[in-house]
Image (cartoon, rainbow, N blue to C red):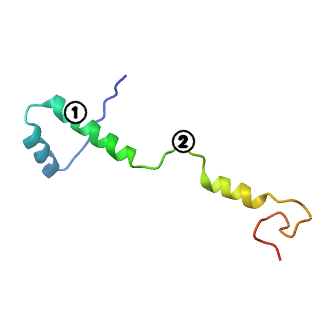
Amino acid sequence: MSKNITLNIDKDLYQLLENRFKEDEQGLKKFIIEAIQNQLSNLPSESSPNKVDDLDSYLKKGSSGSRTYGVKGQGW
């Protein structure tokens, strides 16, 4: 299912797109979608677990009575 998005762009960018695509609305849509997909593919994946939480849980776990006193890297 497709959704509509309205973009406000500056005059110069509009002129560049208008000159390139003239009356080809489908070509313009395809170009914009591909540009967005390309930019999104360069972003880090959101599906990976939060690395800060993983690090925090690692640092907080530790066996009682060990020299780390429950926090790794804080021993004597």
Which image quarter is the C terminus in? bottom right
Question: Which secondary structure, mark 1?
Answer: helix
Q: Residue at x 17, y 32 (%)?
A: 27
Q: Is residue 67 above or below residue 46?
A: below
Residue sitting at the far bottom: 76
Which image quarter is the N terminus in? top left
Q: Which mark is residue 66?
A: none
Question: In the shown orientation, is residue 66 left or right of residue 31?
Answer: right
Q: Is residue 3 above or below residue 57?
A: above
Question: In the shown orientation, is residue 58 left or right of residue 16?
Answer: right
Q: Position of residue 62 (x, y in %)?
A: 82, 60
Mark 1 vs mark 2: give the one in front: 2
Label 1 vs 2, first from the N-terminus: 1
Q: Position of residue 12 (x, y in %)?
A: 13, 52
Q: Residue at x 28, y 38 (%)?
A: 34
Q: Which mark is residue 29?
A: 1
Q: Nearer the viewer, residue 62 or 33?
A: 62
Residue sitting at the far top: 1
Q: Amino acid at mark 2?
A: Ser
Residue sitting at the far right: 65
Quadrant in which residue 4 is drawn: top left
Question: Which secondary structure, mark 2?
Answer: loop
Query: Number of marks in the image?
Result: 2
- Residue of label 2: 47
Q: Position of residue 61 (x, y in %)?
A: 79, 57
Q: Residue at x 38, y 44 (%)?
A: 40
Q: Are marks 1 and 2 in contact (CB under 8 Å)?
A: no
